[in-house]
Structure formats: structure tokens, C-alpha cells
Amino acid sequence: MPLVTSTEMFKKAYDGGYAVGAFNVNNMEIVQGITEAAREVNAPLILQVSKGARAYANHTYLVKLVEAATIECPNIPIVLHLDHGPDFETCKSCIDGGFTSVMIDASSKPFAENIEITKKVVEYAHDHGVVVEAELGTLAGVEDEVKVSAEDSSYTHPEEVEEFVTKTGCDSLAIAIGTSHGAYKFTAAQCTRNEQGILVPPPLRFDVLEEVSKRLPGFPIVLHGSSSVPQEYVKMINENGGKMPDAVGIPEEQLRKAATLSVCKINIDSDLRLAMTGTIRQFFSEHPDKFDPREYLKPARANIKELVKHKLINVLGCAGKA
Ligand code: G3H
Ligand code: 13P
Ligand code: ZN
């Protein structure tokens, strides 16, 4: 089937108590790993492209790779989404260039300015049959090229959400409840340590999520920065020449809980990067003589597929929902 918008997907996810996985794509192997997993477990899918991905791989290559996935996986609905659109022009370029969904991220701007920019994108997008995700509140970590320190990050203020959604007309809303971008989501000082010495992050603010949901009944909420930073891959990286001390993510049980509530879209990127990098590092440790990219990208793609399957089944709960 052709690319779809997330409208129907989110309605089903909200009513069904699950979330759709939104995975970032940057090259063919990542697209293949994700879509093969979704095809195998019959899950709906959002493939998202950041400004950085467009700069790296080129808009046309990414659109065509995702279109290829729709041909290879004819029975699962796939959305092509712009992740963290920084301005109207970037959103317009994606709307004109085949995307079915865009995010305008004006969350770092003052409230009134965020409304103004988001509204402009929504008007253009809706005129072209494209849906819009907006953001209120700021996540810590790296948002594309914007680095936000933990101290600067602020949880979404629930009392602002109704006015924001009504005035902008956005189709979904990303909120800040304590998730964070990247593989180093929290400092050691923000965490406790378990018996294995692994950092345990502060719990997500479910009270904020519940308050937002009460004010926006039936409205799809999005969580960014939702990688769990699997310790098996951090270990694989560290045992094969890498150095990623204290990389820590969001516990999967908390994401599972969010998915049963109003959260309809959960963004995962760093976990895929860790799986790919860990696998390639290990491959080269074990095969220092090899130099054929197909030989090291094949196991990397296979591990991305396994990781995504696990997320779809056990974390998002969207397996069998295509
Ligand atoms: O939230 C950001 C995404 O993980 C995309 O990262 O800007 O490095 O492509 P990127
Ligand atoms: P992670 O860095 O936790 O994977 O978050 C990705 C994300 O939010 C993309 O927008
Ligand atoms: Zn994000």
C-alpha cells in the first residue's frame, strides 16, 4: 500500500492501548532492519527522517528507500515523517517532497511564537493532506543540532496544552515527562545505581502525562527520547574498543506503561545506533582481516531487526496491529 498518514494509526493505538514505533532512518540497512521486523510481526510503522538524516543521505534517497519498503511490505501501513522539523521551510520541503507527516519543533521558542510557527505549518500541511506533530516542553539531550542541558529542560506544563492544540490545530503533541535524547540521558548525579553498578534513572513523570491526557481526551501524545540504551550493546561496544561509560536509557517497563495510556507514538533512534555500532565493532574485533561492507553490515542489519521486533512486541505492544 502507498504511504499513509498517522491519523488512523493513532486512533487505533489510542483505543487499543498500544503505541506505534517511530524509528529514525539514515541508510538502506536501517530501513531494511526496521521494516523486515515490522513485516514479520505485522506492525504499523513510522519511519522518520531528521534534518541531519536529510543532510547525510539526501532527501530523495531516503524517500525512495522508504517507498521501496512500502513495496516490499505491502501489508503494513507506513508513515514517512519529518523528525524535529526546525522551521516552516524544512517542513514545506518535506510536505512537497512526499512525506505524509511532519514535526514542527518550535518548543525552544516562547509559547506564543511556538503557536504561531506551528499554526503556519499546520495550515500548509493540512492543505496538502499531511499531518503535523508539535512539541510543548523541552527534552534534555541532543535535539538534532540543539543541545539542551538537563538543567534547561522543562516538563510540559499541562495547563498550556488545550490552548496550544486548539490554536494550532496540530494532530499530535510531543510532551516532556522526563525522557531525553541520546545515549547519555542522565548524569550519574541524577540517578541511583543498582547492584550491578548500572545507573537507574529517575522515573518518568506519569502525573504530568495523566494531567495532559485529562485535558486532551482522545488526543495522541508522543514521547521523544525513548531509547532504553540496552546494556548488552553498551557492553559490546565497550568490550570491542569503544568507550561509553554510564550510557543509560529509559526503562522499558515505563515505556510499556506509557503505551497503554494516551501515548500513541514512541521515538527510538539511539538504540538502533548502539545495535549497529556494537555489532560492527564486534565484527571487526573478530575479523580484523575483513573489509567487505556487506559482511559487517549484514549482522548489523540483522541485530537492528531483532531489536525492533523486541520493541514492537514487548515495549510498544503494536505487533499484530497492522
Ligand atoms: O532526536 C533526534 C534524533 O535522534 C535524530 O538525530 O539529528 O542525529 O539525526 P540526528
Ligand atoms: P533517542 O535518542 O532516545 O533514541 O530518541 C530519539 C528521538 O526522540 C528522535 O526524535
Ligand atoms: Zn526527538
Image: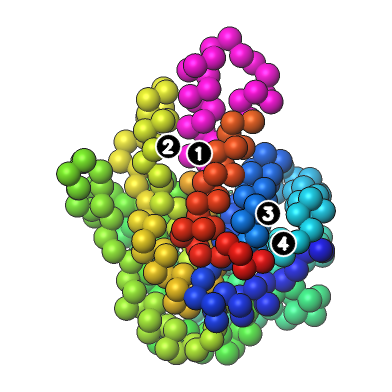
Q: Check the picture and name the quadrant holding the C terminus.
A: bottom right
How many residues crowd around disc 4 within 10 Å: few (fewer than 14), some, or many (20 or more)? many
What residue would you read off at disc 4? 76
Amino acid found under the numbered disc labelled 4: Ile
Relative image position of residue 301 (x, y in whole percent): 62, 37
Relative image position of residue 246 (x, y in whole percent): 30, 41
Residue segment shown in magenta: 272-297
Q: Mark 4 and mark 2: span between their CA atoms?
A: 29 Å
What is the secondary structure assignment of the residue under circle 3?
A: helix
Residue 69 visible here? yes
Relative image position of residue 72 (x, y in whole percent): 79, 50
In the image, what residue occupies the spot 55% across and 50% down?
A: 308
Q: Quadrant of residue 3?
A: bottom right
Q: Is residue 287 magenta?
A: yes
In the image, what residue occupies the spot 53% across and 19% down?
A: 284
Q: Mark 3 and mark 2: span between their CA atoms?
A: 24 Å
What is the secondary structure assignment of the residue under circle 1?
A: helix
Nearest to viewer (mark 3 / mark 2): 3
How many residues crowd around disc 3 within 10 Å: few (fewer than 14), some, or many (20 or more)? many
Amino acid found under the numbered disc labelled 2: Tyr
The one of 236 and 151 positioned closer to us in this rendering: 236
What residue would you read off at disc 1? 275
What residue would you read off at disc 3? 39
